[in-house]
Amino acid sequence: MKLLQFLFKGAGAMFSFGHDIGIDLGTATILAFVKGKGIVLREPSVVAVDNLTGEVLAVGEEARRMLGRTPGNIVATRPLKDGVISDYTVTEKMLKYFINKICGRTIFSPRIMICIPSQVTEVEKKAVIDAAEQAGARKVYLIEEPIAAAIGAGIDISKPCGNMIVDIGGGTTDVAVISLGGSVVSTSLKVAGDKFDEAVVKYIKRKHNVIIGERTAEDLKINIGCVYPKIQDVEMDIRGRDLSTGLPKTLTIHSSEMLEALIEPALQVVDAVHTVLEKTPPELTADISNKGIYMTGGGSLVDGLDKLLQEKTGINVMIANDTVSCVALGTGKALENLDVLDKRKRK
């Protein structure tokens, strides 16, 4: 008996006995929360694959640096599109890489809770569960992104009062009214950070006849992008390819131009909020009017988006602290209830 205890203890020193992991499976970025440790991983959801052999060459930040810069036989892609899996095989390999990176050598596979957009289909849900299980998860649980975002923002969603969350990620924007721990009214639209970047690329091409890459568009959005007039116009120099000559060209872009480029997708987000408010029961609408609208997700950091939403709705709008990590933090807090969920399933 003592020998078995010694061996078991020795194995415990060499291996970990499984983790509870919360994963924000974002279109642009993957964040992972480990129970007791906090956020342990923050990587771009990009994978570089060799087309000839099918071998994964790089994952995360290393693969992101390859976007648009690979030879013919290597493709750097995002296996998630508009918040759902678009390439099942590559997603599975990416999840396996991240799980191994987090867990190291384990005796027991981890239990994993994954965030999903609020309006995904049953087929899309099953694809996420299957990919995680094939990647090495012992059990997989799903949580809607707006609920995780609300928990991560520090909102007590268990009370019988309305809370409105606008979670703007890379692929989707989720708008939900939450009360008593669940979504009362929700919608999900495929307009978010990536669509903002696409709008910038199209605008530069149309206005200046110059083509730029996604990364340059994202830099413009982050540095001088706005959807509400700035007090002082700012500018930024970028490089692209002149479509008339085929040669490199340097441009100076102003924030006023970015306003023109980004206002259309921003107004689509505002329209989605309007639609949800119209469907919300009057008592909950009164709660939202008193408490305000909470914005989370990286897309909510586009300059002036909160002001635009506040102007169009007449309701106070607040951007949550650590907005990029809200969904992952909320998933981490939800991990504490996994044992309760398991007991309910057994019953």
Image (cartoon, rainbow, N blue to C red):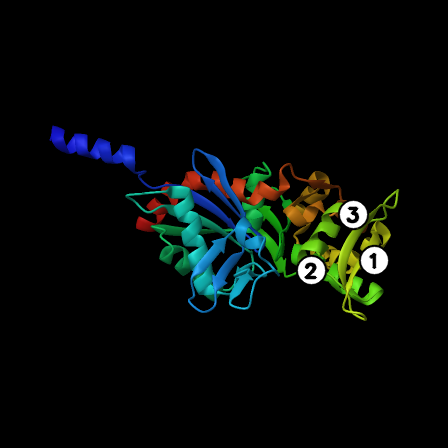
For the residues labelled 2 and 1, the Cα–Cα distance comes to: 19 Å
Determine which residue is flagged by label 2: 213
Using the image, determine if residue 292 lies above or below residue 262: above
For the residues labelled 3 and 2, the Cα–Cα distance comes to: 17 Å
Using the image, determine if residue 102 lies above or below residue 10: below
Determine which residue is flagged by label 1: 260
Instruction: Using the rendered image of the protein, determine whether residue 193 is visible from the camera's viewpoint.
Output: yes
Q: Nearer the viewer, mark 1 or mark 3?
A: 3
Q: Where is residue 92 in the image (x, y as percent from the top left)?
A: 43, 59
- The reply, left or right, for residue 130 in relation to residue 148 is left
Determine which residue is flagged by label 3: 224
Please tell me which residue is depicted at 48% across the width and 54% down the height of the picture.
58
- The reply, left or right, for residue 89 in relation to residue 17 is right
Please tell me which residue is depicted at 13% across the width and 28% down the height of the picture.
2
| Residue closest to the eye, 104 or 285 | 104
- Name the amino acid type tagged 2: Gly
SS type, badge 3? helix
